[in-house]
Amino acid sequence: MENNWVVKPWGRFKVLFENNDVTVKILEVNPGECLSLQSHRFREEMWTTCDGNSIIQQEETFSFPSAKKTFFIPIGMKHRLFARTGTARIVEVSYGKFDENDIIRYEDKYSRIS
């Protein structure tokens, strides 16, 4: 962990705030990388883009947002974040029980499906 950043194969994230009900993180996805196609059992998320480098997948819908666009991801929705040619940065607010083991992976280019 570098200055509280958690390094992942797709980039890194940092928890900015956490309590029993809400967790706020910033995610940085390296150019050309992506998170797994995933859903959560116990939390919903709100993503806000910090730049125009993101591609956001919600189920079968893909969005190519500019900065300051917000996306709501309910419990159980399949979703994924891609970075285009630059680093994609989003602020993620999780509502509900936050646990990294809450992730159900459907596709993952880093072979993390159990």
Image (tube, grey):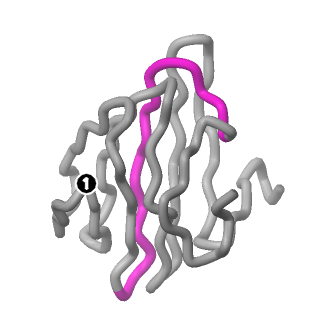
Q: Report the front residue among 28 and 114.
A: 114
Q: Is residue 30 visible?
A: yes
Query: 24 left or right of 75?
Result: right
Residue 10: percent from the left, percent from the top?
A: 59, 72
> Which residue is disc 1 drawn over?
59
Does 67 lie within the magenta span?
A: no
Left or right, residue 102 beside residue 79: right
x 37%, y 30%: residue? 75
- In the rendered image of this protein, does residue 65 appear above or below residue 47? below
Q: Mark 1: which amino acid?
A: Glu
Please check the rendered image and state whether residue 91 is part of the magenta-colored stretch, yes or no.
Answer: yes
Which quadrant, please, contains the N terminus? bottom right
Quadrant of the rendered image containing residue 92: top left
Residue at the spot 49% in from the left edge and 18% down from the top edge: 96
Position of the C terminus, as image quadrant, is: bottom right
The vertical placement of 40 against 109, above or below, is: above
Which region is colored magenta? 85-100
**At x 44% / y 44%, what residue is drawn?**
39
